[in-house]
Amino acid sequence: MLRPDRSLTEKMFEEGALRLLVCTATLAWGINLPVHTVIIKGTEVYNPEKGGADDLSILDVLQIFGRAGRPQYDSKGEAIMITAHKSLAKYLGLLARANPIESSLIKSLPDHLNAEITAGTVTNVKEAVTWLSYTYLYVRMQKNPL
């Protein structure tokens, strides 16, 4: 979808002119609109590396479900998933366990920090610590230091 069309669609939805949006999982990642109800119709997505279908990742499911019932806009939200019977137990288990999402920044921290140094954002150790404190890695390290 072209950016002007997307912006118009989002604006019309926010203003109530459109009451329903239908989008792919990829597009759902890029849309930042509060909604009351989210429906995931089908959980199989094409995986080009595999050359076939894969189940939608739990991260994608949680990201999409997270659009429903945002506290600043709504008192509650609903999330509905329609999936194949063979995938039902998997998703129920993953959603019921609700394991915290961990940061993967640690794997590439030197690269990111070097980029910040090169850009001039970080010029000393104190600024590096401040920069790190703005990351999700910092948040998770506070709660789950490995």
Image (tube, rainbow, N blue to C red):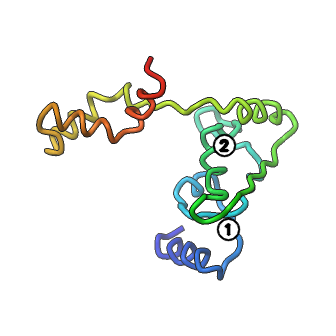
Residue 57 location, x and y as percent? Answer: 64, 37
Which image quadrant: the C terminus?
top left
Identify the element where label 2 is drawn: strand
Which image quadrant: the N terminus?
bottom right
Residue 39 location, x and y as percent? Answer: 75, 56
Question: Which residue is pictured at 54% across the width and 77% down the height?
Answer: 11
Asked where in the image residue 56 lies, by quadrant, the reply is: top right
In this view, which residue lies farthest toward the top?
Answer: 146
Question: Which residue is pictured at 70% across the width and 29% down the height?
Answer: 97
Left or right? Give the position of 105 relative to 42. left
In this view, which residue lies farthest toward the front?
Answer: 75
Mark earlier in primary sequence (2, 1): 1
Q: Nearer the viewer, residue 14 or 28?
A: 14
Identify the element where label 1 is drawn: loop
- Name the residue carrying label 1: 21
Q: Report the amino acid beneath label 1.
A: Leu
Local crowd at mark 1 within 10 Å, few (<14), some, or many (≥20)?
A: few
Left or right? Give the position of 114 relative to 93. left
Asked where in the image residue 136 lies, by quadrant, the reply is: top left
Residue 145 location, x and y as percent? Answer: 43, 20
Local crowd at mark 2 within 10 Å, few (<14), some, or many (≥20)?
A: few
Q: Nearer the viewer, residue 96 or 58?
A: 96
- Name the residue carrying label 2: 46
Q: Nearer the viewer, residue 119 or 130?
A: 130
Q: Report the amino acid beneath label 2.
A: Tyr
Question: Which residue is pictured at 12% across the width and 38% down the height?
Answer: 123
